[in-house]
Image (spheres, rainbow, N blue to C red):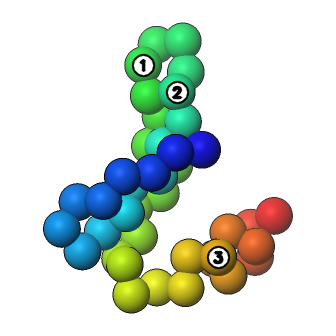
């Protein structure tokens, strides 16, 4: 999974055959590691 910042947000995405798939959009103040661990 890859990410890039847009203002105060991080956009997480994956590359797929047809282009990209947006997985998540999170505000930068959130605890991103915990969010992804809870999903795991």
Q: Mark 1 = which residue?
A: 19
Q: Residue at x 46, y 85 (%)?
A: 30
Image coords of residue 29 (percent x, y)? 39, 87
Q: Nearer the viewer, residue 5 or 38?
A: 5
Q: How many marks?
A: 3
Q: Is residue 17 above or below residue 12?
A: above
Q: Marks 1 and 3: CB-CB under 8 Å?
A: no
Which image quadrant is residue 14 in?
Answer: top right
Image coords of residue 5 (percent x, y)? 30, 59
Q: Residue at x 42, y 19 (%)?
A: 19
Q: Residue at x 55, y 85 (%)?
A: 31
Q: Mark 3 = which residue?
A: 33
Q: Residue at x 56, y 76 (%)?
A: 32
Front label number (1 vs 3): 3
Neighbor class of circle 1 (other Cα within 10 Å; few <14, some 14-19, many 20+) is few
Neighbor class of circle 3 (other Cα within 10 Å; few <14, some 14-19, many 20+) is few
Q: Marks 2 and 1: CB-CB under 8 Å?
A: yes
- Residue occupying the far right of the picture: 40
Q: Mark 2 = which residue?
A: 15
Q: Is residue 19 above or below residue 36?
A: above
Looking at the image, tell me whether mark 1 or mark 3 is earlier in sequence order: 1
How far apart in space, not on screen, are marks 1 and 3 (Cα)? 26 Å
Which image quadrant is residue 16 in?
Answer: top right
Q: Nearer the viewer, residue 6 or 40?
A: 6
């Amino acid at each position: 999974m890859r990410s890039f910042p847009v203002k105060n947000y991080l956009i997480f995405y994956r590359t797929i055959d047809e282009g990209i798939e947006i997985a998540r959009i999170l505000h930068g103040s959130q605890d991103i590691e915990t969010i992804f661990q809870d999903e795991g």
